[in-house]
């Protein structure tokens, strides 16, 4: 069973595939758009852009720090470079270069971290970007987006390319449920309420948005009416949506495929404390690295399932 099946959602594309399609479309409209790749374009899907616009695609090899520096130079010359690699290779390996060559000068570089989270499975912990959102959020001026499905990814790709300044987009390898089969009304910094409810609110992003909807479905028989917010933009955060949820439902569960510290849970908790204090529970990878294994099995082992989310809702409702 895939995440979202309980909710009647169809399994769609992986977000990396949607990103590749959207990037190619953006390239046809924007002659300043270019890519700088770390020799993994077949995995990140930047190869679709490279095949269509070979004179605007640059492969620097397995050298992520140099990739970032080249992109900074291109942006300083007026281009709109998109750099893409595995999330752990980009944010972990090249963090200092991102800090000094992109964030500090506030350059128009679009950073894309693919194969994020533990759901890449058999590749193992050395390939799993599970601290990337925290690292990206720590950089002043950098937009951080974690789309939930293909439609959201397509819209997010267009949005960050159109908006000046540095941005980080997190995408994944696994196919995900179609949350928005009719298209996504995506706005940077504006959460989307994908399910109404009054008993509690689940705030999620990425593939865990489908898990949140499944959990809400599971809880219907218990007369627990759950609101679900797709918090696709972690930075800038939709504090107003969080404050409304805390006030109107009185309890929040934050769900993410990320470490416990520094990601969506941390920023939501900060917003709740500053606006309308309410009990909050968290579902995430915890304070640990995962291991190599089947993607579905890893999600179960590390507690990233609809059942785990539903249990967190039950706990937080009891604390109201």
Image: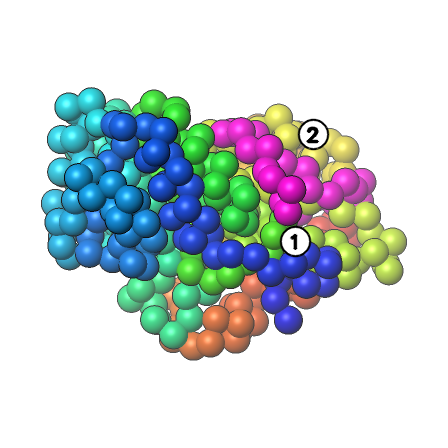
Q: Position of residue 6 (x, y in %)?
A: 72, 63
The quadrant of the rendering that contains the C terminus is top right
- Specify few, some or many for label 1: CA neighbours under 10 Å numbering under 14, 14-19, or 20 or more: many
Location of mark 1 (residue):
212
- Read off the magenta span: 180-203
Left or right side of 211 for 110: left
Residue denoted by label 2: 244
Q: Is residue 105 left or right of residue 180?
A: left
Q: Residue 188 carries which label?
A: none
Of 204 and 82, the residue lying toward us: 82
Going 45% across and 49% down the picture, which residue do you hit? 18
Evaluate whether residue 287 shows in this view: no
Identify the element where label 1 is drawn: helix
In the image, residue 127 sits, relative to residue 192, either above or below, namely below
Q: Position of residue 207 (x, y in %)?
A: 54, 55
Mark 2 vs mark 1: give the one in front. 1
Quarter placement of the N terminus: bottom right
**What kind of secondary structure does the magenta stretch mostly adopt?**
loop
Can residue 54 be spotted in the picture?
yes
Whichever of callouts 2 and 1 sits on the residue coming sooner in the sequence is 1
Q: Residues within 10 Å of mark 2 (few under 14, many from 20)?
A: some
307 vs 216: above or below: below
> 136 or 83, which lies in front?
83
Asked which secondary structure carries label 2, the reply is helix
Above or below — where is 25 with respect to 2?
A: above
Left or right of 231, for residue 36: left
> With 99 as the anchor, is 260 left or right in this view?
right
The way the protein has been coloured in the rendering is rainbow
Q: How far apart are marks 2 and 1 (CA)?
A: 18 Å
Q: Residue at point 69% right, 53% down?
A: 213
């Amino acid at each position: 069973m895939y995440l979202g099946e309980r909710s009647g959602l169809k399994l769609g594309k992986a977000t990396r595939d949607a990103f590749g399609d959207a990037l190619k479309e953006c390239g046809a409209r924007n002659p300043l758009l270019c890519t700088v790749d770390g020799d993994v374009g077949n995995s990140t899907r930047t190869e679709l852009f490279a095949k269509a616009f070979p004179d605007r695609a640059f492969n620097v090899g397995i050298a992520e720090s140099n990739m970032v520096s080249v992109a900074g130079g291109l942006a300083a010359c007026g281009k709109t470079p998109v750099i893409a690699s595995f999330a752990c290779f980009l944010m972990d390996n090249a963090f200092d270069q991102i800090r000094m060559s992109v964030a500090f000068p506030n350059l128009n570089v679009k950073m894309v971290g693919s194969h994020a989270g533990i759901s890449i499975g058999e590749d193992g912990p050395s390939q799993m970007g599970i601290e990337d959102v925290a690292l990206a959020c720590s950089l002043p001026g950098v937009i951080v987006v974690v789309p939930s499905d293909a439609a959201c990814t397509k819209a997010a790709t267009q949005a960050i390319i159109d908006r000046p300044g540095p941005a980080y987009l997190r995408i994944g390898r696994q196919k995900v449920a179609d949350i928005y089969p009719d298209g996504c009304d995506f706005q940077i910094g504006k959460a989307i309420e994908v399910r109404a409810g009054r008993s509690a609110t689940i705030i999620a992003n990425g593939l865990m948005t489908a898990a949140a909807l499944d959990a809400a479905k599971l809880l219907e028989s218990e007369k627990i009416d759950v609101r679900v917010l797709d918090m696709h933009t972690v930075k800038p955060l939709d504090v107003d949506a969080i404050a409304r949820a805390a006030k109107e439902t009185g309890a929040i569960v934050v769900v993410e495929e990320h470490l416990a510290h520094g990601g969506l849970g941390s920023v939501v908790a900060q917003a709740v404390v500053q606006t309308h204090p309410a009990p909050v529970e968290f579902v995430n990878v915890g304070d640990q690295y995962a291991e190599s294994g089947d993607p579905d099995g890893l999600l179960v082992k590390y507690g990233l399932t609809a059942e785990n989310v539903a249990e967190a809702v039950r706990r937080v409702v009891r604390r109201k």
